[in-house]
Image: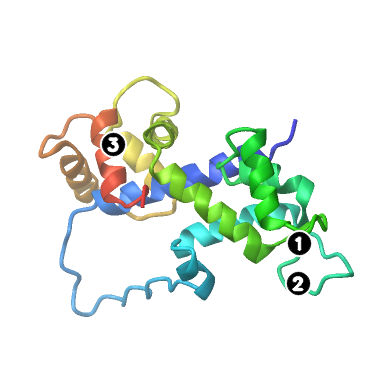
Amino acid sequence: MTSVPLQRVLYSVQRAIAAPLSVMAPKRKQPAAGPAKPAAKRRSKLAKEHDITPDEEAEIQEAFNIFAQHPSEYDAKEGMIPTGEVRRCLIALNAPPKDNTELAELIETVDPDDEGWVSYESFVAIAALKLHAKHDDPEAQREEVEKAYMLFTRGQGREVTIGDLRRVAKELREDVPENVLKDMIREATGGGLGGVNMEDFEGVMRRAGVFG
């Protein structure tokens, strides 16, 4: 059994975890002498063409690179993936084909001449379509919320606590003061200092822009 889907799930969860931390943090004015914030990531021409974010393109490229090869008959900087690996590549992106019919249609799109290879640009086109469809799928969104929530609670059926935020911040190497952690809880719960339930957590993820 391949470990690729697990790798993809872990990558997605880490991204989903980082976003709530940033959104849950209260909006405070930065000191005048503080360090400048890093510039926002710019979308590539390919990302703009397919209406995906820089982070989404990075995810697509990571999945593509798992299977990329460099056949001698092609001069492709990013390499190519065998047509037979399209399904596994999409699984690695956590956006698998719904069935064999859809898979056949996708392969026909990226390899119309049946050459047996798929370029990075062609794969981005179908991957972007799958990601857009996923953003519009409430069931897929709920699954992503649950994965991130369970990482905070370590798989336990309980609310997210300030201790969980403290642990996750440490794992992400974020230096977050205790008073800010409390404000993050208040932001998620609407003012209280109790635990954050699944509904509140989903709201945080939506404000983070995780679902586009």
Q: Which residue is mark 2?
A: 76
**Residue at the spot 60% in from the left edge and 39% down from the top edge:** 97
**Residue at the spot 75% in from the left edge and 52% down from the top edge:** 67
Of residues 188 and 91, which is closer to you in this image? 91
* Chain-order first, disc 2 or disc 3: 2
Locate residue 157, reporting x and y percent: 37, 19
Q: Residue furthest right?
A: 72
Q: What scheme was used to colour the molecule? A: rainbow
C-beta proximity under 8 Å, tags 2 and 1: yes
**Residue at the spot 55% in from the left edge and 42% down from the top edge:** 95
Q: Which residue is mark 1?
A: 80
Inspect this view and state whether residue 177 appears: no
Question: Eyeballing the image, is 121 above or below 101?
Answer: below
Question: Eyeballing the image, is 5 above or below 176?
Answer: above
Locate residue 13, reporting x and y percent: 47, 42
The amino acid pointed to by label 1 is: Met
Q: Which residue is mark 3?
A: 201
Inspect this view and state whether residue 128 appears: yes
Q: Secondary structure at mark 1?
A: strand
Question: Distance of mark 2 from mark 3, alpha carbons?
Answer: 42 Å
Which of discs 2 and 3 lies nearer the camera? The answer is 2
Question: Eyeballing the image, is 37 above or below 125?
Answer: below
Locate residue 140, reporting x and y percent: 44, 35
| 165 relative to 196 in the view: left or right | right
The amino acid pointed to by label 2 is: Ala
Of residues 39 and 94, which is closer to you in this image? 94
Quadrant into which the N terminus falls: top right
Q: Residues within 10 Å of mark 2 (few under 14, many from 20)?
A: few
